[in-house]
C-alpha cells in the first residue's frame, strides 16, 4: 500500500469509508510534519468534505492552527477561531495552538488542491475560473479531477472550458500517442484567444513533425481571428474617441460657423459642465444618496444652463465689441479662459475631483472578443442624442431658421428684420451650453480639473475645420473619422506621433479644401 501514489491511496480510502478517510486527512494535517501535511492535502483534494476548500486555503494563508486532541482551527482576520472539521465558531481558544507549517512543497500541494477543489464549487463563476487556470497550467496529472468535473458539469460555458483544459493537458502529455495529441489541438484552438495562441506556441518546440504541422495550422487560424478582433476593437475605440470629440466640438461648430469667432474659452465651458456634475453629486451624496443614479440626468440640464449663462455673459460683455477683429477676439477669449480656470481653482481647489459613475454606467460586457464598457457605450449614445437634438433645433425651430439665415447671409438677414446681435448672443449661449453638456459626459472618462478643457480645445478646432465650418453633418463625420483613424494609427506610430500625423494631414487637406469636407456658405466666405 505504501508504494501506491498518495492520490490513489486517498481514493481507496474514500471508497472504503468516506468519513474515516476525511478524519484521517485532518489527523495527518494536525500531525504538523511536512510529509503528513502534504498527504493530508492530497487526500482532501479528492474528498467531498464540505470544509476541505476552507482548510486548504487556510494552510496556504498560514491561518490554520493545530490544538490539543487533534483539533484544527482556522483563524479569521479579527482573531476569531473556527473548527476546521465542522465549520463552527469556537467560543475560546482550546489551549495552546501551533501554526501548521508550510514550505515550497506544501505551497505547491495547496495550489494543486485549490484547483481541484474549486472545480467542485457550487458557484459556476468559480468553476469557470478554475477551468481557465487549469487550461493555462495544462498539467498532465490533472486528468482525474478534470474528467470528474466534466462528468458532473451542467453549465455549457464551464463544461467547454473544462474540455479545453483537458485537451491542453493531453497536448502536453508526452506519454500520450501523437494521434491523441493532434486530436487535442482543435479543442485548444477553439478557445481562439491569446492564451490559446501562447499555449500552442509553447507546445511546438518539442512536438513531433505531424503535431508541429497541426500546431502551425491552428496558430495561423487564431492569428487571423485575433487580427479581425483587433480591427473591430480599434474601430470601437475609435468610435468611442469620436463621440468624445463630437461632444467637445459640436458647440464650437455652431458658434464658429455663425459668428466666425475663434473662441479659446470653449474648453472652459466644458470644464464648467464637468464641475456642475461634480457639484450635483456632492449635494446628492450629502442630502439624498438614494438619488445618486439620477445625478447625471439632473446635471445635464443644469450644465446647459450654467455654461450657457456664462457664455451669454462673455458674449455680451466682451465679444460683441470685437466682431470683425479676429486676432483681438482670440486674445480676449484666451484671457477669459485663464480667468475662468483661476476662478475654478479658487472655488474647488487645484486638485482633481472625482465624478462617480451611476450603476447603469459601471461594468462591461464581452461582445465577440471585444470588451465594451457601459460608460463608453452610453457616451456614444449620448453624443448622438445631443447631435440629433441640436440638428432638430437648427432645422425645425424659428430660432434655428434665423440662425441659418444669419450664417448664409448676415446682411440680408438683417434687412429682413432679424435681430442679428440677438442671434449672435443666443447662438454663443447655445454653443457654450452644449459644451457644458459635453463636460458632464467627459467627467465619466477624464479627471475633473481646472485644465480639463485644455485637453480638448485643439482637437475640437481640428474637427470643426476638417468637417466644414458650421456644418453639423461635417462635424459628425469628422469627429468619428478622426477618432477611428487615430486609434488605428496608435498601435503603429504611438499616441504622440499619430496625433502629429493627423495634424499634418489636416494641414495638407486644408490647402486643397480651405472650407473643409462639407463646405457651408457663411459670412466668412462672403465677398
Image (tube, rainbow, N blue to C red):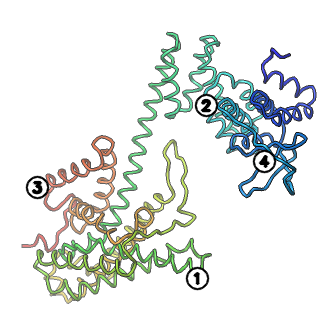
Residue 113, above or below 478:
above
Residue 382, above or below 276:
above
| Numbered disc 2: secondary structure | helix
| Numbered disc 3: secondary structure | helix
Q: Residue 448's image quarter?
A: bottom left
Residue where numbered disc 1 is placed: 287
The mark that comes first in sequence, 4 or 1, is 4
Q: CA distance from mark 4 to mark 3?
A: 75 Å
| Numbered disc 4: secondary structure | strand
The mark that comes first in sequence, 2 or 1, is 2
The mark that comes first in sequence, 1 or 3, is 1
Q: Nearer the viewer, residue 177 or 183?
A: 177
Density class for disc 2 (Cα within 10 Å; few <14, some 14-19, many ≥20) is many
**Do the residues bearing badges 4 and 1 touch, measured as CB atoms within 8 Å?**
no
The mark that comes first in sequence, 4 or 3, is 4
The mark that comes first in sequence, 3 or 2, is 2
Q: CA distance from mark 4 to mark 1?
A: 43 Å
- x then y, percent, for residue 27: 86, 34
**Residue 74: numbered disc:** 4
Residue where numbered disc 3 is placed: 511
Closer mark to the observer between disc 1 and disc 3: 1
Of the 4 image quadrants, the one containing the N terminus is top right
The mark that comes first in sequence, 4 or 2, is 4
**Do the residues bearing badges 4 and 2 touch, measured as CB atoms within 8 Å?**
no
What residue appears at the point 74 percent right and 53 percent down from the top-left corner? 76
Q: Residue 326's image quarter?
A: bottom left
Residue 54, above or below 227:
below
**Residue 135: numbered disc:** 2
What residue appears at the point 53 percent right and 62 percent down from the top-left corner? 361
Amino acid at each position: 500500500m505504501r508504494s501506491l501514489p498518495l492520490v490513489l491511496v486517498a481514493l481507496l480510502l474514500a471508497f472504503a469509508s468516506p468519513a474515516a478517510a476525511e478524519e484521517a486527512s485532518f489527523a495527518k494535517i494536525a500531525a504538523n510534519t511536512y510529509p503528513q501535511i502534504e498527504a493530508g492535502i492530497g487526500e482532501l483534494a479528492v474528498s467531498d468534505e464540505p470544509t476541505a476548500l476552507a482548510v486548504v486555503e487556510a494552510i496556504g494563508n498560514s491561518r490554520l492552527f493545530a490544538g490539543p486532541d487533534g483539533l484544527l482551527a482556522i483563524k479569521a482576520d479579527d482573531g476569531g477561531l473556527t473548527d476546521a472539521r465542522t465549520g463552527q465558531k469556537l467560543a475560546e481558544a482550546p489551549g495552546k495552538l501551533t501554526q501548521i507549517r508550510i514550505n515550497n512543497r506544501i505551497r505547491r500541494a495547496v495550489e494543486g488542491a485549490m484547483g481541484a477543489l474549486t472545480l467542485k464549487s457550487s458557484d459556476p463563476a468559480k468553476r469557470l475560473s478554475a477551468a481557465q487556470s487549469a487550461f493555462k497550467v495544462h498539467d498532465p496529472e490533472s486528468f482525474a479531477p478534470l474528467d470528474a468535473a466534466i462528468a458532473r458539469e451542467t453549465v455549457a460555458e464551464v463544461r467547454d472550458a473544462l474540455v479545453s483544459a483537458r485537451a491542453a493537458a493531453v497536448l502536453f502529455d508526452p506519454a500520450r500517442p501523437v494521434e491523441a495529441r493532434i486530436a487535442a489541438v482543435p479543442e485548444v484552438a477553439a478557445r481562439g484567444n491569446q492564451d490559446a495562441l501562447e499555449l500552442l506556441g509553447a507546445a511546438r518546440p518539442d512536438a513531433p513533425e505531424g503535431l508541429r504541422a497541426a500546431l502551425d495550422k491552428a496558430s495561423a487560424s487564431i492569428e487571423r481571428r485575433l487580427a479581425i478582433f483587433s480591427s473591430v476593437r480599434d474601430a470601437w475605440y475609435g468610435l468611442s474617441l469620436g463621440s468624445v470629440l463630437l461632444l467637445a466640438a459640436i458647440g464650437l461648430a455652431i458658434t464658429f460657423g455663425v459668428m466666425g469667432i475663434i473662441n479659446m474659452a470653449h474648453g472652459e465651458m466644458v470644464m464648467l459642465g464637468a464641475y456642475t456634475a461634480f457639484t450635483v453629486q456632492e449635494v446628492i451624496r450629502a442630502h439624498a444618496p438614494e438619488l445618486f443614479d439620477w445625478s447625471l440626468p439632473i446635471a445635464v440640464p443644469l450644465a446647459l444652463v450654467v455654461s450657457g449663462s456664462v457664455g451669454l455673459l462673455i458674449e455680451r460683455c466682451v465679444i460683441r465689441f470685437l466682431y470683425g477683429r479676429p486676432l483681438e477676439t482670440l486674445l480676449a477669449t484666451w484671457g477669459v479662459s485663464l480667468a475662468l480656470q483661476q476662478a475654478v481653482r479658487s472655488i474647488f481647489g487645484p486638485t482633481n475631483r472625482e465624478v462617480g459613475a451611476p450603476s447603469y454606467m459601471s461594468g462591461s460586457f464581452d461582445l465577440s472578443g471585444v470588451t465594451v464598457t457601459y460608460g463608453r457605450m452610453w457616451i456614444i449614445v449620448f453624443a448622438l442624442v445631443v447631435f440629433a437634438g441640436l440638428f432638430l433645433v437648427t432645422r425645425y425651430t424659428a430660432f434655428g431658421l434665423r440662425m441659418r439665415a444669419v450664417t448664409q447671409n448676415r446682411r440680408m438677414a438683417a434687412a429682413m428684420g432679424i435681430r442679428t446681435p440677438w442671434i449672435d448672443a443666443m447662438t454663443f449661449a447655445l454653443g457654450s451650453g452644449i459644451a457644458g453638456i459635453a463636460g458632464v459626459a467627459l467627467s465619466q472618462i477624464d479627471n475633473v480639473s481646472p485644465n480639463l478643457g485644455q485637453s480638448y480645445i485643439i482637437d475640437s478646432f481640428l474637427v470643426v475645420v476638417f468637417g466644414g465650418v458650421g456644418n453639423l453633418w461635417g462635424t459628425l463625420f469628422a469627429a468619428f473619422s478622426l477618432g477611428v483613424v487615430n486609434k488605428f494609427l496608435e498601435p503603429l506610430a504611438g499616441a504622440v506621433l499619430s496625433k502629429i500625423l493627423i495634424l499634418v494631414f489636416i494641414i495638407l487637406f486644408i490647402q486643397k479644401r480651405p472650407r473643409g469636407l462639407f463646405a457651408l456658405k457663411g459670412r466668412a466666405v462672403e465677398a
